[in-house]
Amino acid sequence: MCRHLAYVGPPVTLASLVLEPPHSLLRQSYAPADMRGGGTINADGFGAGWYPEPGGPAARYRSAGPIWSDASFAALAAVTGSGGVLAAVRSATVGMPVTDTAAAPFADGPWLFSHNGVVRGWPQSVAAAAAALPVTDLLTLDAPTDSAFLWALVRHRLRGGADPADALASVVTEVAAAAPESRLNLLLTNGTAIWATAWSHALSVRTDDSHALVVSEPIDPHTTWTAVPDRHLVTACPGHRRFTALATTGEE
Ligand code: GLN
């Protein structure tokens, strides 16, 4: 299972979030702490998204290789600063391609998105949900993976004017009903706020008056993190954090 993080707050370098903390995504790529049986390391690609201009479209760097062997990213990350960042390291689900386009973040204008988990029964289990999308959305998926498809579902709702929290919640409940036992930790930011779901996988949040961070695994054990309860959505921005229970399909 992939590991991901999103940050909003004062501008910081990508390196200060992704490479330098004691339990950074770099470290989580080869020594993750809480994979819950979903793979062992996160070496099948990585990506980072940020905002060159506050309020503008996101920029991305994605690769199919392990983050630890990419010197170009390390050099870029040391000098690239932003007040909004979403980054992920990937452990590809068996059978899914290892390409740069399969690595998060997925993007559309100001939106950056990542998925940690797996859609069970892929792709048959979600064929009906796919049929409800515009054909061009399906023809232009970043990659033929469950994560890229989940992004297409979320993006379709955002383009239709849905509230970001509602978009994530409705995708999780629809896919969980169609594909039980799926792991659906979704992460979304527009550079000023973060929305994320915990659905069968680890997720933690840290906020203060200046910043918000949502992470698969705490990147710095010396600061205080709050675990997001399973089957909940978290909305976070500087000075604010809210947990909302996600509707279940009657299994609880
Ligand atoms: N299933 C997704 C993929 O293969 C995400 C994998 C993960 O969370 N490890 O890209």
Image: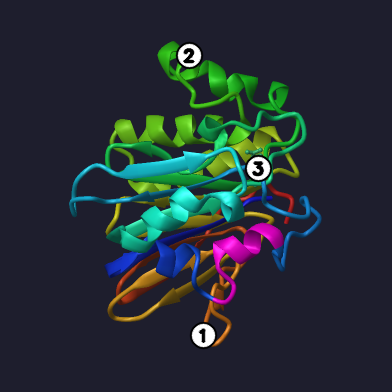
Helix, strand or loop status at disc 3: loop
The answer to whether residue 95 is left or right of residue 70 is: right
The residue under the point 78% across, 50% down is 39
Disc 2, disc 3: CB below 8 Å? no
Disc 1, disc 2: CB below 8 Å? no
The residue under the point 50% across, 46% down is 114
Scheme by which the image is coloured:
rainbow
Q: Earlier in the sequence, mark 2 or mark 3?
A: 3
Helix, strand or loop status at disc 1: loop
Q: Which residues are magenta?
A: 22-30
Q: Position of residue 156 (x, y in %)?
A: 39, 29
Instruction: Indicate the amino acid at tag 3.
Output: Asp
Mark 1 — residue?
Answer: 224
Which quadrant is home to the C terminus?
bottom right
Q: Marks 2 and 3: which is nearer the front?
A: 3
Instruction: Indicate the amino acid at tag 1.
Output: Thr
